[in-house]
Amino acid sequence: MGRILAIDYGRKRTGIAVTDPLQLIANGLTTVHSSEVLTFLTEYFGKETVDTVVVGYPKKMNNLPSEAVKYIEPFVRKLNKTYPDKDVVMMDERFTSKLAVRSMIEGGAKKKTRQNKGIVDMVSATIILQSYLEMRSNKILK
């Protein structure tokens, strides 16, 4: 069984999280510049077995796609084309940045750490991945 990797794709930075090999626990992995995501993934996939890639999909409160979708959809097409052997799943990412900051506050992170957008993006990817794992275990997803 391979890992599940989650991506919080942004115009500048991309947060990445990954599960353990048993697909039980979501952990923040890193943040990379968005222009370097595919290079990072190629290197990571060369070292680790990954079955599924979960990509955060931004929606508005009315459940329609947000403006950021125009950046994410081309990335997902490129991801599918570059790694056709990976199962790519889109996951609603509403509120993940706010939840990330709140969880950092509750975890005792200092203000300077919470202002580091790279860390916030990585925590957001972890929240996306944890949501996916919970929905899958509740049989809402495959």
Image (cartoon, rainbow, N blue to C red):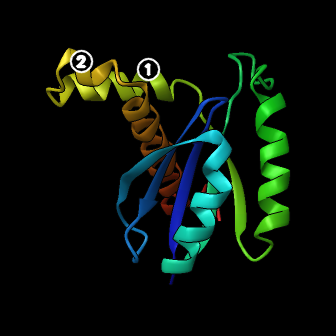
Q: Is residue 30 above or below residue 64?
A: below
Q: Is residue 46 above or below residue 121?
A: below
Q: Please provide percent x and percent y for residue 35.
A: 67, 43
Position of residue 1 in the picture relative to residue 61 (left or right):
left
Q: Please provide percent x and percent y for residue 51.
A: 61, 74
Position of residue 87 in the picture relative to residue 98 (left or right):
right
**Residue type at the position of mark 1:** Lys
Q: Secondary structure at mark 1?
A: helix
- Name which quarter of the figure residue 83 lies in: bottom right
At a point 62% along the width and 51% down the height, the residue shown is: 37
- Name which quarter of the figure residue 110 lies in: top left
At a point 85% along the width and 64% down the height, the residue shown is: 81
Whole-number angstrom distance, CA of label 2 to CA of label 1:
16 Å
Q: Secondary structure at mark 2?
A: helix
Q: Which residue is mark 2?
A: 112
Q: Which residue is mark 1?
A: 98
Task: Give whichever of 120, 56 is nearer the camera.
Answer: 120
Q: Residue furthest left?
A: 108
**Residue type at the position of mark 2:** Lys
At a point 84% along the width and 29% down the height, the residue shown is: 70
